[in-house]
Image (cartoon, rainbow, N blue to C red):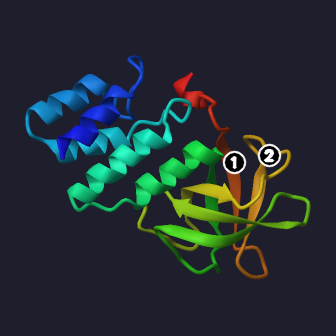
């Protein structure tokens, strides 16, 4: 079970840090102390979209399966490595239906030009987004979204009227270093 984690840790650049400030050495230390679940969690927490590869995510998925953990988040993150990262802060309208966590396919978005575009959406760090509340969401557009930049305001449509408004807070293309990693 620890072999895929050790191999994944070996793929992390020396200067890379997880959100909590951990390094690949920390991962190896937890593995040496027979804490594979902690090591796995740290590895999932690295945000280096520029260096993460399919191999990295495949190793984490293999480890998760061996420990009988969900691979949903790993699969999502692998997709970001392949297609890029788009995060936005969504404020759900007060009359909108609540949105539960997990992957939600076929969400419709207006980038300000009146054209509805499809994306898969995932809420970060929240089990349910209630009406009138805000949450950070990750979006994976079905097709490239033209002329989108940080700070852009986009509208979330489930039905008429608009179900929410989101402000783009982060964009990173395939192979680009995330702003917070620069």
Residue 136 to residue 155: above or below: above
- Furthest toward the top, the residue is 15
Query: Helix, strand or loop at disc 1?
Result: strand
Give the quarter of the figure containing the C terminus: top right
Q: Which residue is mark 1?
A: 168
Q: Is residue 32 left or right of residue 12?
A: left
Q: Position of residue 31 (x, y in %)?
A: 15, 35
Query: Helix, strand or loop at disc 2?
Result: loop
Q: Residue at x 39, y 35 (%)?
A: 19
What mark, if any, has residue 148 been given in the picture? 2
Q: Residue at x 54, y 58 (%)?
A: 135
Q: Quadrant of residue 164?
A: bottom right
For the residues marked 2 and 1, what is the alpha-carbon distance in whole angstroms? 8 Å
Between 127 and 138, the one nearer to me in the picture:
138
Residue 36 to residue 75: above or below: above
Q: Quadrant of residue 110?
A: bottom right
Q: Residue at x 19, y 41 (%)?
A: 2
Question: Could you tell which of marks 2 and 1 lies nearer the N-terminus?
Answer: 2
Q: Are marks 2 and 1 in contact (CB under 8 Å)?
A: yes
Asked whether the viewer can see residue 85, the reply is no
Q: Quadrant of residue 157?
A: bottom right
Q: Is residue 36 left or right of residue 117?
A: left
Q: Residue at x 59, y 63 (%)?
A: 121
- Furthest toward the left, the residue is 33
């Amino acid at each position: 079970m620890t072999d895929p984690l050790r191999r994944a840790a070996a793929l992390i650049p020396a200067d890379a840090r997880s959100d909590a400030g951990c390094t690949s050495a920390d991962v190896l230390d937890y593995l040496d102390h027979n804490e594979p679940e902690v090591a796995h969690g740290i590895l999932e927490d690295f945000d280096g979209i520029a260096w993460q590869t399919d191999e990295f995510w495949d190793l984490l998925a293999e480890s998760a399966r061996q420990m009988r953990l969900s691979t949903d988040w790993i699969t999502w993150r692998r997709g970001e490595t392949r297609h890029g990262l788009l995060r936005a802060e969504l404020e759900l309208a007060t009359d909108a239906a609540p949105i539960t966590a997990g992957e939600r396919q076929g969400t419709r978005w207006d980038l300000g030009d009146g054209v509805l575009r499809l994306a898969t959406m995932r809420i970060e760090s929240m089990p349910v987004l209630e009406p009138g509340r805000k949450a950070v969401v990750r979006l994976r557009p079905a097709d490239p979204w033209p002329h989108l930049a940080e700070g852009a305001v986009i509208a979330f449509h489930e039905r008429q009227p608009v179900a929410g408004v989101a402000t783009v807070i982060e964009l990173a293309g395939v192979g680009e270093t995330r702003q917070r990693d620069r």
